[in-house]
Image (cartoon, grey):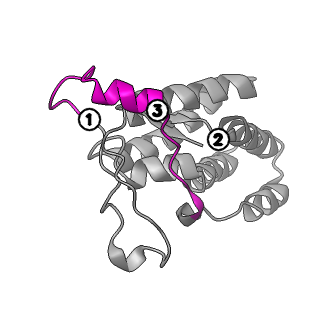
């Protein structure tokens, strides 16, 4: 792949991941710790490097990689069906870059909807999960889950938006 198309592919990966609500939520709320933003930037570079050093990466392989990174680096599980879509989009953009089709690449990226976190809803917590949490199965003081309450400044909250304290959740996040 030519250097300019390599840059185009890296930019496409950055744009796709930047518009992915699952990753955006994880970074915005610090699910990956204080260096969440750095982890997201690393992910862009890791995907770029993986594609440039390997031939014929399949969509399911990228999907598995993204799932692993979300789980290990951001304590997040994407349960919204977006993993296959994101993986397919990245693989498709790579193929366009391989063929030097920057016009089609730009058109595809321009069609990406902007990431609007205001449309995201917290996953419902079942009574069984609440029972598990209240039964003391987790170690006292070892709640690694950041609280989502007060994570959005009041100036950015929507008028009818209800802020829900999710600090009781397990250390991973399920996003639907």
Q: Is residue 92 magenta?
A: no
Horizontal side of residue 79 vs 165, given as left or right:
right
Is residue 137 one of those drawn in magenta? yes
Which stretch is magenta?
119-143
Residue 48 falls in which quadrant of the image? top right
Q: Which residue is drawn at 54% across and 61% down?
A: 117
Residue tagged 3 = 127
The residue wearing badge 2 is 80
Q: How far apart are marks 2 and 3 (CA)?
A: 21 Å
Q: Which residue lies under the disc numbered 1?
A: 144
Name the N-terminal-most of marks 1 and 3. Answer: 3
Give the CA distance from mark 1 to mark 3: 21 Å
10 Å neighbourhood of mark 3: few (<14), some, or many (≥20)?
few
From the top left corner, tell me how far across and down residue 152 is, in percent.
36, 66
Q: Is residue 163 above or below residue 134?
A: below
Q: Which of marks 2 and 1 is nearer the N terminus?
A: 2
Q: In this view, does 171 lie above or below 139?
A: below
Q: In which quarter of the image is the C terminus?
A: top right
Residue 162 appears anywhere in the view: yes
Majority secondary structure in the magenta region: loop
Give the label on residue 100, or none. Answer: none
Q: Residue at x 69, y 44 (%)?
A: 2
Helix, strand or loop at label 3? It is helix
**Which of these two is toward me, 170 or 95?**
170
How many residues crowd around disc 1 within 10 Å: few (fewer than 14), some, or many (20 or more)? some
Tell me, yes or no, whether the two marked residues, 2 and 3, touch with CB atoms within 8 Å.
no
Pair 2/3: label in front: 3
**Along the line of sight, the residue nearer the viewer: 37 or 44:** 37
Residue occupying the far top of the picture: 137
Q: Does residue 65 appear to the left or right of 173 in the view shown?
A: right
Q: In the image, 15: left or right of 144?
A: right
Question: Label 2: how many residues lie within 10 Å, few (<14), some (14-19) or many (20+)?
Answer: few
């Amino acid at each position: 792949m030519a250097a300019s198309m390599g840059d185009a592919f890296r930019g496409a990966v950055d744009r796709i991941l930047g518009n992915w609500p699952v990753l955006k939520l994880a970074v915005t709320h610090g699910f990956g710790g204080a260096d969440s933003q750095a982890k997201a930037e690393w992910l862009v570079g890791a995907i770029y490097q993986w594609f440039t050093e390997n031939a014929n990466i399949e969509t399911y392989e990228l999907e598995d990689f993204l799932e692993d990174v979300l789980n290990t680096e951001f304590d997040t599980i994407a349960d919204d069906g977006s993993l296959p879509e994101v993986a397919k989009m990245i693989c498709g953009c790579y193929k366009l870059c391989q063929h030097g089709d920057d016009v089609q690449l730009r058109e595809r990226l321009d069609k990406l909807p902007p990431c609007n976190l205001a449309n995201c809803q917290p996953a419902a917590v079942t009574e069984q999960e609440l029972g598990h949490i209240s039964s003391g199965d987790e170690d006292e003081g070892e709640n690694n889950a950041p609280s989502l309450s007060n994570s959005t400044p009041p100036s950015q909250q929507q008028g009818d938006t209800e802020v829900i304290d999710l600090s009781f959740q397990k250390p991973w996040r399920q996003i639907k």
